[in-house]
Amino acid sequence: DTKELFGAAIWQLGKAIDSPFKSVLKMAKLEVFLENLEQEQPLCNLLKKRVHHGDEAPGNVANIDPYALMFDQLLSHYQAVNEPETVLLLQQCLYIKCNCQLSQPVAESDITFKRRIIAGLVKQWGWTKSQIRHLDNSHNWSLTELVELSRKIHRFLIYCYRRMSSQLQMDNQSVSREDMAVLGRRLDTFYSKKEHKLEFLRIGFDDKVFCPVITIKQHRRKNGQQVWAAYYDDQLGVLGKNQEKARISVAESPVRLILWCVCNRVIDISTTVLLDYDTDPVTDSDIHALIKHFGKIFGPVRVNAIPREALLSPMQIKACMAVVNFTSSRLKPTVDEVTVIYTTTWGETYVVPGKESLDKLWFELQESVPRPPCYIFVPESSQRKRIYQAFIDAAEQDFELLNYW
């Protein structure tokens, strides 16, 4: 029923937040079904026809596998419309999802039906041993490689959804307004780009992004702008292409950089952080203290775990934190630099630089019920308490001074 297609498509977008490989295949199936709705025969009829002809499944398996048949149908469609990148993406997603590890030999008694099917498909595709070994070795991929594949996945999902929605009558769908509101807000939280909003690392390898060791460096761009970058592993003294391959993220400030890494599960309090030689006055202790507090106050968000009631209610600030004088001289006794961070009940986190940033939030902080907790972090120095008091006097809000250790 075409009335259910739009709901199914937006549902798969939501599922892709946690399980992108399966959602890619399901979304492709929905699009192919819609494209061939009038002229294509049902898959069950095609299956019967293949069985009656005595066809075999890939891998010389006597029984036709309906899933392999469906996948062949998807590939045929995208080959016919000249989308080789989509064909390769679907092949990679199926292979990774099945996790057969074909580059690792197994005893004949341990060869499963699924392994034989996947081996037959891979042979049809003409993959080389190095291609197979590369996918089997994804646990050793750099974060750059993981992100590159994940971006292709989410780009395909969004394009697929847009193509389908342009062909469907939105007012004739079987999705309730309430369900649409919840799904829409989850997708907005996960995908949308907004001023000062911290972006999610849209990746299908959550268990592989954590870095036990990272290096943080400060760079000066050609226009004179200072930026901070995080690299996986020990990159002290490393320059050029080797350094770029190890890059995790870049931000205008170390505060935003560290917060992004914490919120996206790249680092936690157990991570060893190596600071480059030109990051004064920021110290290792400053970084670790910030990681500790970010983990407690702005920990990673599972978008699909945000309560339905919260998404159906007006958005409110959930917690707020001001980081003061993080890159300023530790001898300075006044409030020199402020970065305000806040998270919302819809799962979004914002990083707003500037002393005036609190002025724009005072109403939300004051009128929210319950009132959100507000914190302030000041790096360790002899001026720490004086800076805190000066900030409180200017903010006219209650902020709890966080312990440094």
Image: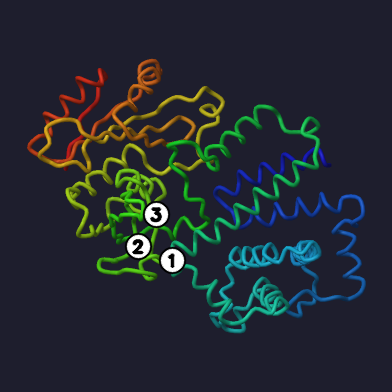
Q: Is residue 292 left or right of residue 313?
A: left
Quarter residue 175 falls in: top right
Q: Amino acid at mark 2?
A: Tyr
Measure the C-alpha gap from mark 1 to mark 3.
13 Å
Question: Which residue occupies the extreme top position in the image?
Answer: 367
Give the x, y percent position of residue 328: 19, 41
> Camera-side residue: 405 or 66?
405
Q: Is residue 343 above or below residue 117?
A: above
Pointer 1 local density, CA inside 10 Å: few below 14, some 14–19, many at least 20: some
Whether residues under marks 1 and 2 lie with C-beta atoms below 8 angstroms apart, the answer is yes
Q: Residue at x 39, y 70 (%)?
A: 241
Q: Residue at x 18, y 51 (%)?
A: 280
Q: Nearer the viewer, mark 1 or mark 3?
A: 3
Quarter residue 393 falls in: top left
Q: Residue at x 21, y 33 (%)?
A: 336
> Camera-side residue: 76 or 270?
76
Q: Which residue is mark 3?
A: 249
Quarter residue 2 falls in: top right
Q: Which residue is mark 1?
A: 142
Q: Which residue is mark 2?
A: 232
Q: Earlier in the sequence, mark 1 or mark 3?
A: 1
Measure the C-alpha gap from mark 1 to mark 2.
8 Å
